[in-house]
Image (spheres, helix red, strand yellow):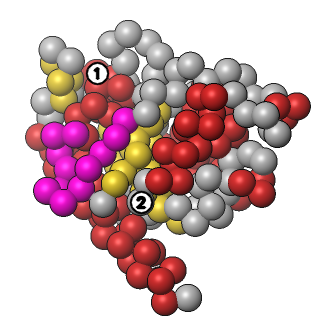
Amino acid sequence: MKILAFGGSFRKGSFSKIVLKETKYLLPSDVDIKIFDIKGISFFNQDLEQNLPENVVKFKLEIKNADAILIVTPEYNYSIPGFLKNAIDWASRPISDNSFNEKPVAIISSSTGMFGGSRAQYHLRQSFVFLNSYVLNKPEVMIPFVDQKIYNNRLKDEKTKEKIKEILKALSRFALEIKKMKNKA
């Protein structure tokens, strides 16, 4: 099982990026994860859909080759960061080559506030409905007060680690179920 993970934040010391990197240590034994850095993806420009930038081509290929997608996001102004939306827009275009079509997707959100990035997570879920992805509904992992759960650039909160293990295990099972369903069709 191959999971492609991306998101985080561009900020040095980003809490979401730390959570994203922590997933490597919390995987089920039969699952591999690859973290893709979306930092270099330029602003979406529909004029370039027929001649995609090289890093967008690579991003789309990584998504297509993955069995499942994991997104870890902070919450910016009650929503998702612009750079994350931008990367999703590129990967879904042109719509006839939507890399997220029928992909299993799981979302982890975090915030220094008490809602754990829930509003960002729900906005992402809304986008993936249009992209025809299969978004894992449960467990929902929203990490409140994330700044209090990280020490020396590592996630130290055991309850949060357990929730991340749960979502990774559930995403793996979900992806297998979808693969079986597609093979029967």
- Quarter assignment of residue 12: top left
Q: Residue at x 69, y 38 (%)?
A: 90
Disc 1 element: helix
- How crowded pointer 1 is (Cα within 10 Å; few <14, some 14-19, many 20+) is rated as some
In the displayed structure image, the side of residue 158 where residue 21 appears, left or right: right
Q: Which residue is mark 1?
A: 147
- x then y, percent, for residue 32: 26, 50
Residue nearest the observer in this picture, 167 or 24: 24
Q: Which residues are magenta?
A: 24-35
Q: Earlier in the sequence, mark 2 or mark 1?
A: 2
Q: Residue at x 73, y 33 (%)?
A: 52
Q: Which residue is mark 2?
A: 67
In the displayed structure image, the side of residue 57 where residue 39 appears, left or right: left
- Quarter assignment of residue 88: top right
* Depicted 116 relative to depicted 18: above or below: below
Is residue 33 on the magenta stretch?
Answer: yes
In the displayed structure image, the side of residue 95 where residue 98 appears, left or right: left
- x then y, percent, for residue 93: 74, 45
Distance between mark 2 and mark 1 Cα atoms: 31 Å
